[in-house]
Amino acid sequence: MLKNKGLKMLLWIGLSILLVVFIVITAFFVYKIQLRKAELVHTIFDNPDSTAVVVYTFDSNAKLVEDGSDLFLNADTPLITASMMKLVVLAAYETAVAQGELNPDELISIADLEGYYLPKTDGNAHISGLASLGLKTDELGFALDQQAVIRLDDIAKIMIHFSGNAETDYLIQRLGYERVNSVIGMEHHTPIHSILGISLAMMDHEHSLANNDLRQNLIRDVEQKNFAYFDNLVDLYLNNPAWRAKQIDYMRSDQYIDAANQLGWQGQVDAGQLFPKGTAREYAQLMASIASRGFVSTEVSTQIQTKLESIPTDWPLRAFFFRRYGSKDGLTAGLINLASYGVPKNGTLSRQSRVSVVMTNNLPVKFWLDQVKGEGIYFIQADLIRAKGIWTLFQ
C-alpha cells in the first residue's frame, strides 16, 4: 500500500513539474511574440517612407465599411513587393483559365518547368512543392524523374503554397507579360518581369552584382522599364546548354558562396530594387475583391480563394483565429510583406470580412532575422484583422 502511494506521489510530482515547465515555456513564447510584434509596429512608425499598412472591413461588394476599425498608413507609396506579386500572376492565370485560354489539367513536363529553376535561390520552394506531389529531387532540387509530368494547376499551387519562383516564371511565360501586367486594379504597380532574370543577375557566374556599379545601373534600368539585361540572361539559361551548365556548376561551388558574401547585406537589399513595386491600397483592394467574389467573376474569384485559403503553413491562423483566411507573403533581404483577408471567429468583428496588408522595406539585418524567426508579421496581421491586441499601438 505504501509503495503504491509512493508511486502515485512521484507521478503527481512529475506531472506537476511538467505542467510548470509547460506554463513557463508558453509564457516565454507569448512574451517573445508580443516583443516581436511591438518591435515591428515601432519600426513601421519610425520608417514611414519604407513601410505601409492598410486594414479595413469590407462588404459583399468589396467596399470599405465605415466601422472605425480601418487604418491607412502610407497606403499609396509603391514599395517592393517580392513574392507578394505572385498574387497578381495567380489572378492573371485564373482569369485565363476561366476564359478557356489555359487548361488547368494540361500535363506539363518537369523538364520544361525546371528550365526556369535556378538552385539555391528560392528557399527550397521548388523542392517542397515537388515533394508535396510525391516527386523526389537531387541535391540541387532538380527532379530525379525528368520524364515526370504535373498538372498546370499544380504549378500554380506550388507558386502560392510554397512561393515557387520557377513555377511563377513558367506561368508568366505562358500568360505573357502584357497579360500579367494588365490585371484589373493594379494600375500603380510597376512591371512584373522574370524572377529568374533577377536571380541570375544577382548570381551570374560571369558578372556578380557584388559589383556596385553594375547593381546601380540595373536598378536604373528597372526604373526605366528596361529589362534587356535580364532577358539576355534568361535566354542564355534557357537556350544555351553550355552557359546553363556553367551557371549550375557555379551554384554548387564555393565561388557562389564567396560571391554571396561579397554582395553582403546591403548589396542584397539594393538588389531587392530589381523586383516590382506596388501599393498597399491596391493589394488590399485586390484581396477584398477576391474574398467577396467580385474579382472578374465568381468563378475566377472562387478558384483564387481555393489556393489562397489552403496554404499549408497558414493552418494555425485558420484553426485558431478565422472562419476564412487567405494570404500571400513576400520575403527577401530587408523586406517582409503580407497581404491577407480573413473573417474572425470571435470578438467585436466576428463574422465580418476584413483585409490587411503590411509592407516593410529596408529592414536592418538583425531586426529582419529576428522578425523572420519570430514570424511577427503574421501575428500582427491576425491582430489587425481582428482589431485587437497590437491594434491599439497603431491608434
Image (cartoon, grey):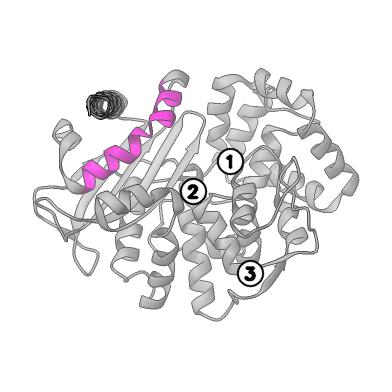
The residue tagged 1 is: 222
Which quadrant holds residue 363?
top left
Q: Are marks 2 and 1 in contact (CB under 8 Å)?
A: yes
Q: Most prominent secondary structure in the magenta stretch?
A: helix
Mark 2 packing: few (<14 Cα in 10 Å), some, or many (20+)?
many
The answer to whether residue 368 is magenta is yes
- Looking at marks 3 and 1 on the same chain, the residue that comes earlier in the sequence is marked by 3
> Compared with residue 23, is residue 387 higher up or lower down, i.e. above or below?
below
- Going by the numbered disc 1, the residue's amino acid type is Val
Q: Position of residue 161 (x, y in %)?
A: 50, 54
The residue tagged 2 is: 190
Q: Are marks 3 and 2 in contact (CB under 8 Å)?
A: no
Q: Are marks 3 and 1 in contact (CB under 8 Å)?
A: no
Seen in the image, is 172 located left or right of residue 11? right
Residue drawn where x is 71% and y is 52% of the image: 136
Q: Nearer the viewer, mark 3 or mark 2?
A: 3
The span from disc 2 to disc 1 (Cα, nearest Å) is 9 Å
- Going by the numbered disc 3, the residue's amino acid type is Arg
Mark 1 packing: few (<14 Cα in 10 Å), some, or many (20+)?
many
